[in-house]
């Protein structure tokens, strides 16, 4: 019975954490279609965590290894089934959390680099270069965070044409700020425009303002996230200290009823932690082009 309670409570904590901590898509989905869309979203996000992003198979293997390691460590330290299964669930979620952190850092680097790239494009257009020539030059001398995408964009322009190459670059970056730049470039390419430099100047100013605001908000967000982690870890650390200093004091938690109470306590900690993360979460900007 204790094992069944532990399995149920551990699975509940893991499912609740994943459902609340993961970003919402805004579209309903159920059954196999929901699972398939989740797997497709994960497969798309893996390459965006960085140029060395791992594949789905490596990600699954890492999740399993982290779950086994965390579960084994918790079993050695505490010896309670509900804590072991909860630790295994959190260990399984660790690669996904790391992926989200890397993706957020990558997004911040791209936002910073886009402002510099727009200024370089503006200067190239002002001296008389065409859009394609300016993008080729940007692929060689542009910001490091954008060079892989810009180099692929340059190759796609030669092989598939300007509009198709720009569409592929938008899909690779999936960034609202780059969508805004793509609109200006597409409009100028299709109908021409002598005021492209002025348009790029306005876009660059808007990008710099947006990046500056997001940088300030991220600094405030980091403080809230740190507070949430400290508050969530405090009860767990306190229980571990008591168990190490006076194990007999926590003997009641070794019984099935005690395991159930402990599981509910862990569930309440997870709910509070995720709620605090939700309060500190930055609103995501919507894509301009699809």
Image: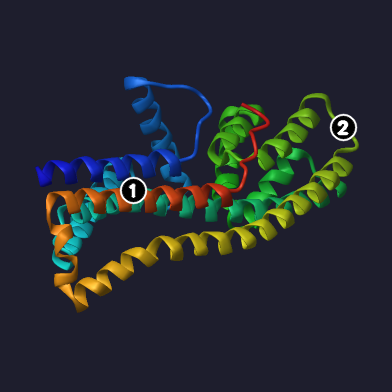
The disc at residue 193 is: 2
CA neighbours of label 2 inside 10 A, class few (<14), some (14 to 19), many (20+): few
In the displayed structure, would residue 89 be above or below residue 161?
A: below
Q: Residue at x 74, y 50 (%)?
A: 210
As measured in the structure, the alpha-carbon distance from the residue carrying label 2 to the one carrying label 1 is 59 Å
Protein image colouring: rainbow
Comparing 92 with 227, the one in front is 227
Query: Residue 157 location in percent, x, y?
Result: 62, 34
Query: Residue 284 location in percent, x, y?
Result: 61, 41
Instruction: Quarter of the image for the C terminus: give it.
Output: top right
Q: Which residue is mark 1?
A: 267
Instruction: Quarter of the image for the N terminus: give it.
Output: top left
Task: Tell me: 229 left or right of 286.
Answer: left
SS at circle 1: helix
Q: Residue at x 29, y 48 (%)?
A: 264
In the displayed structure, would residue 30 be above or below residue 272?
A: above
User: Mark 2 near mark 1, Cβ–Cβ under 8 Å?
Assistant: no
Query: Residue 89 location in percent, x, y?
Result: 27, 49
Task: Tell me: 137 left or right of 6.
Answer: right
Query: Residue 44 location in percent, x, y?
Result: 44, 37
Residue 132 position by quadrant: top right
Name, please, the residue furthest toward the bottom: 245
CA neighbours of label 1 inside 10 A, class few (<14), some (14 to 19), many (20+): many
| Camera sees residue 226 | yes
């Amino acid at each position: 019975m204790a094992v069944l309670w532990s399995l149920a409570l551990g699975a509940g904590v893991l499912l609740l954490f994943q459902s609340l901590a993961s970003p919402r898509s805004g579209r309903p989905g159920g059954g196999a279609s929901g699972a398939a869309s989740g797997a497709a979203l994960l497969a798309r996000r893996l390459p965006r965590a960085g140029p060395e992003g791992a594949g789905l198979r490596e990600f699954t293997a890492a999740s399993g290894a982290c779950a086994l390691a965390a579960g084994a460590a918790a079993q050695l330290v505490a010896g309670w089934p509900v804590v072991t299964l909860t630790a295994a669930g959190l260990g399984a979620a660790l690669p996904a959390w790391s992926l989200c952190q890397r993706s957020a850092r990558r997004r911040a680097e791209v936002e910073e680099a886009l402002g510099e790239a727009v200024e370089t494009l503006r200067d190239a257009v002002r001296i008389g270069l065409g859009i394609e020539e300016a993008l080729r030059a940007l692929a060689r001398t542009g910001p490091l965070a954008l060079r892989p995408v810009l180099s692929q964009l340059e190759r796609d322009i030669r092989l598939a044409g300007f509009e198709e190459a720009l569409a592929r670059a938008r899909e690779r970056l999936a960034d609202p700020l780059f969508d805004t730049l793509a609109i200006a470039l597409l409009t100028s390419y299709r109908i021409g425009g002598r005021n492209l430099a002025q348009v790029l100047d306005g876009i660059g100013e808007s990008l710099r303002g947006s990046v500056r605001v997001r940088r300030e908000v991220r600094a405030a967000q980091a403080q809230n996230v740190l507070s949430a982690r400290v508050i969530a870890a405090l009860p767990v650390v306190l229980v571990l200290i008591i168990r190490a200093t006076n194990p007999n004091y926590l003997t009641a938690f070794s019984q099935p009823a005690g395991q159930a109470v402990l599981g509910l306590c862990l569930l309440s900690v997870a709910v509070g932690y995720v709620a605090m993360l939700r309060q500190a979460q930055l609103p995501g900007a919507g894509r301009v082009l699809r």
